[in-house]
C-alpha cells in the first residue's frame, strides 16, 4: 500500500519514512506491516505490505475454518480483523481530510 498521499497527516503522527510507518501501523493494527524499504523501496517512500494471513485468525483451527467455509466474511475472527483494519485506515483518511484545504 502506498500511503504517500497521506504524508502530511502521517507526519503529524511522527511518521516520516517507511520504517516509522511500519512501526506505526504494526502497533495500530496489531499485526505486522513491513515497510516497503524491506522490499527494495526507498526508505522515504511511505509504502507497506499488508499480509492477509493475520485476517484469517490466530489459530490453525480458525484459519482452516476460513478456508472451508462458504462465507468467511461472516466468521467472527475475520469480521473483527477487517473492522480493526478499516478503523485504522478510516482514522488516517479522516486525518488526511483535515489537512486538505477547504473547497
Image (spheres, rainbow, N blue to C red):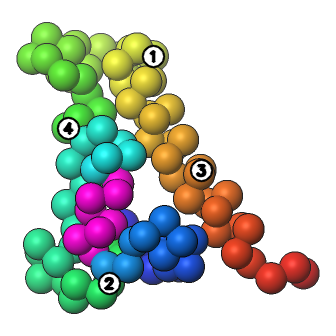
Residue annotated with mark 1 = 74
Q: CA distance from mark 4 to mark 3?
A: 21 Å
User: Based on the displayed image, in which of its 4 quarters is residue 61 positioned?
Assistant: top left
Residue annotated with mark 4 = 53
Please state the horizontal and vertical placement of residue 15, each as a whole percent of the image: 39, 71
Q: CA distance from mark 1 to mark 2?
A: 35 Å
- Left or right of 23: which side holds 7? right
Disc on the earlier residue, 3 or 1 = 1
Q: Secondary structure at mark 4?
A: helix
What secondary structure predominates along the stretch shown in magenta?
A: helix
Q: Is residue 75 visible?
A: yes
Q: Are marks 4 and 2 in contact (CB under 8 Å)?
A: no
> Callout 4 environment at 10 Å: few (<14), some (14 to 19), or many (20+)?
few
Q: CA distance from mark 4 to mark 1?
A: 17 Å
Q: Extreme right residue here? A: 103
Q: Disc 3 vs disc 1: which is toward the camera?
A: 3
Disc on the earlier residue, 2 or 3 = 2
Residue annotated with mark 3 = 90
Q: CA distance from mark 3 to mark 1?
A: 21 Å
* Membership of 20 in magenta stretch: yes
Tell me the magenta residue range. 18-25
Residue 51: mark: none
Residue annotated with mark 2 = 45
Q: Secondary structure at mark 1?
A: helix
Q: What residue lies at 36% left-to-right and 43% top-to-bottom?
A: 29
Q: Are marks 3 and 1 in contact (CB under 8 Å)?
A: no
Disc on the earlier residue, 1 or 2 = 2
Q: CA distance from mark 4 to mark 2?
A: 24 Å
Amino acid at each position: 500500500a502506498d500511503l504517500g498521499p497521506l504524508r502530511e497527516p502521517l507526519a503529524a503522527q511522527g511518521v516520516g519514512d517507511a520504517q516509522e510507518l511500519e512501526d506505526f501501523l504494526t502497533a495500530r493494527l496489531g499485526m505486522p506491516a513491513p515497510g516497503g524499504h524491506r522490499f527494495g523501496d526507498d526508505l522515504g517512500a511511505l509504502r507497506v505490505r499488508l499480509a492477509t494471513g493475520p485476517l484469517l485468525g490466530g489459530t490453525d483451527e480458525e484459519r482452516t475454518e476460513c478456508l472451508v467455509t462458504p462465507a468467511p466474511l461472516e466468521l467472527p475472527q475475520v469480521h473483527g480483523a477487517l473492522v480493526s483494519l478499516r478503523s485504522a485506515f478510516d482514522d488516517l483518511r479522516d486525518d488526511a481530510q483535515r489537512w486538505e484545504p477547504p473547497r
